[in-house]
Image (spheres, rainbow, N blue to C red):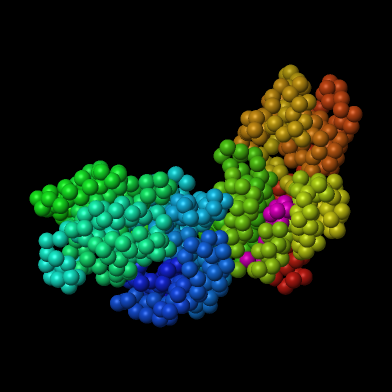
Amino acid sequence: MSEAGDGRARVDILLAKSYDPDPRVRRTAAALIEAGYDVRVLAWDRSGKRPINELDGPIAIRRIHVRSRASRGWTQVFFLLVVALRLLPVIRRRRPEVLHAVNLPMLAVALALVPFVGGRPRVVYDAFEIHSLMGAHRYPGWLVALIGIIERYLPRLADLVITPGEDRRRYFAGLGIASVAIPNWIAPPAMIPDRAAARRRLGIAHDRFVVLYAGGIIGSRDLQPIIDHAARRPDDLVLIAGRGDSEKQVTAAAAHVPNVRMLGWVAEPDDLLAASDVLYYALKPDHPYAAHAAPNNLYQAVAYAIPLVYREHGEIAVAAADHEIGRSFSDTRSLEIALEEMRDPARNAAVRDELRMLQPTYQWSRAAEILIDAYRAGTAAPREAVVTPAQEASTSLVVLTRIWPTPDRPSVGSFVRARVTGLPGIRVVRPRIPRLPRLPLYLLLLVDLLRVRGPISGIEAHMLIPTGFVGLIAARLRRVPLVVYSHGGDVREWRRLAAPLRLASRLVATRADAIVTNSKDTAEHLRELGRDPIVIPPGVDLRRFSPTPRPPERRVLYLGGLNPGKGYDIAAQLADTLVGPWLRDVDPGGVPALMAAHDVVLMPSTAEAFGLVAVEAIASGRWVVASDVGGLRDIIEDGLNGFLVADGDFAGAIARVPDYDPEVIARSVERFSLERWQSEMAAVWDGLRRSNGTNGGHG
């Protein structure tokens, strides 16, 4: 990681609150500063009243004033956009090495700003909240579902994800997101205020039983039970400290209960904690967030040795399973029993002793060590990703593709992988999560394309639409040439696409710097879109295929899988071996052996933009029986290395296969070598370099 002028790596912590201060952010920033990082907190002040610049000890605070309020729902996106625009010049001036985003809205801001900051800062996602669960009772179902989708996929773009506890780490692991648990532990204060003195300062009688809630006053918190308890027990005192979007409702509920004090936000709660007999914490039992809560109250209870009265959920349940931290409750009766038990001085003292025993384990200094180790491992270098190579190059070509071989589908997109095989200076951007729905998949491709580090000479997009459209946006933003390679299926039925996709297809075809395609047949479709393409058929690594003696008996091979367009129904009646996608996928490395074990390769396709299988079969010295369609006409010389069947009589064509010489057959496809394909593509890029004055020339 590069460093600031004073030798310290710069970290900007993005916070969607005004920093009053936020206890976890304060501890995180202080730990990073102590470890040698140059830390600044960039906070969104929705009131517009807090100082723009402020110091909290060694922590520099810079506030962005954009007036808004909490719980706006989806309309908050517009305010967040304004915040992002105002943050950009502030961040660009400093050029931090790390953007540390606290919670999901700021993660979206951080990822959006990364391409424009310069130097490609690492992104750390501090996932303190689970927003889809937090908002389940406040927002309409469609918005909660959308937040859930974003929360499932956006964190995968971060270089490091940290969570406030083990339960939360397991939750994200269930979504397929690796994270590091940084517990929200609190160091016991060096000096806890004297209980009697604290009560005198707060005006509380020395013998009064005091219940404290200190935290957010929001929809998920269930404060009504403790307010109802105060009404039943007027001798007890209930203190509620905090603020949030439910503050008005809670204040109204407590208005007629004189022994409930609404204290608002208390920045330094030491006196409150020292004066209280128990801490109260409960989420509404039917709230989805209840199962994953990681409350500060638990760690305050340990740090100040104050018994908890709690509902068992989240991290509290994890701690309560092994330690006596107070008493749990589930309803009104059990709440009264729990409070009565904690009212007993002996039982209260016993729980306090147990909590003091936990203090060496629940130390923030231990959590800080985990944080720093995670930071150094997760932000010192890019995490393994599909944008390769990770190191910067002087200039490089970026190949953009949606299709790429995967362990379960090794043959899909193998021709794109062949395109870049053995060529230096090429980076590949492909889906991180191949099975994503289309819209988020292409949005993530665009994000990854914009995040490619260093200068690039151009973008080569494989498929006209939607991949080519993504490439066009990125190429214009990065001011580099765009070459689109159309493989046929993306344009064959372009007239049947929805109107927006037809418009996008024509836009890409006419605005790309060059359009290349695989066959004369595909070229005709592209001319309908207003562009005369360059025809460069894809190549095959002919070193992998060599002619071998024919098997003693006729055996017919079909490799099209279950795709009806490949003629599976016909092949099922005529072929001895049927393989391919969704049937029995074959790794490309196993194809030569399959070819050698058969003497006829059957391709009864209804349409075929090119037909790499035909090239591979002929290179293996095998006769091809194929439909007289598309790009197959460019490959098969009828009667010399195969038959082109126009009348549908594939059985008759197989019966007429001659006693051919595999060596002669193989020589007929030397023009389809991988080296020829890469060389001709390099010539296209060289031509663009000469005409545009850009760096290029990648084969």
Whole-percent x, y for residue 93 in the image: 50, 79
Q: Is residue 238 left or right of residue 587?
A: left
x and y percentages locating residue 71 in the rendered image = 48, 62
Above or below for 542 versus 192: above
Say if 586 sits above or below 118 in the image: above
Query: Residue 423, how many percent across, how many down?
Result: 63, 55
| 272 horizontally vs 398: left or right | left
Q: Look at 73% across and 68% down and name the residue there.
A: 689
Q: Residue at x 72, y 27 (%)?
A: 557
Q: Residue at x 87, y 25 (%)?
A: 649
Q: Looking at the image, can residue 264 be seen?
A: yes
**Residue farthest to the right?**
647
Outermost residue toward the top? Answer: 553
Is 123 in front, or is 19?
Answer: 19
Comparing 43 with 646, the one in front is: 43
Q: Measured from the top left, where is residue 564 in percent x and y? A: 75, 32
Q: Magenta stretch?
A: 456-468
Look at the picture and state if 668 lies above or below 477.
Answer: above
Quadrant where the N terminus sits is bottom left
Q: Which quarter of the figure is the C terminus placed in?
A: bottom right
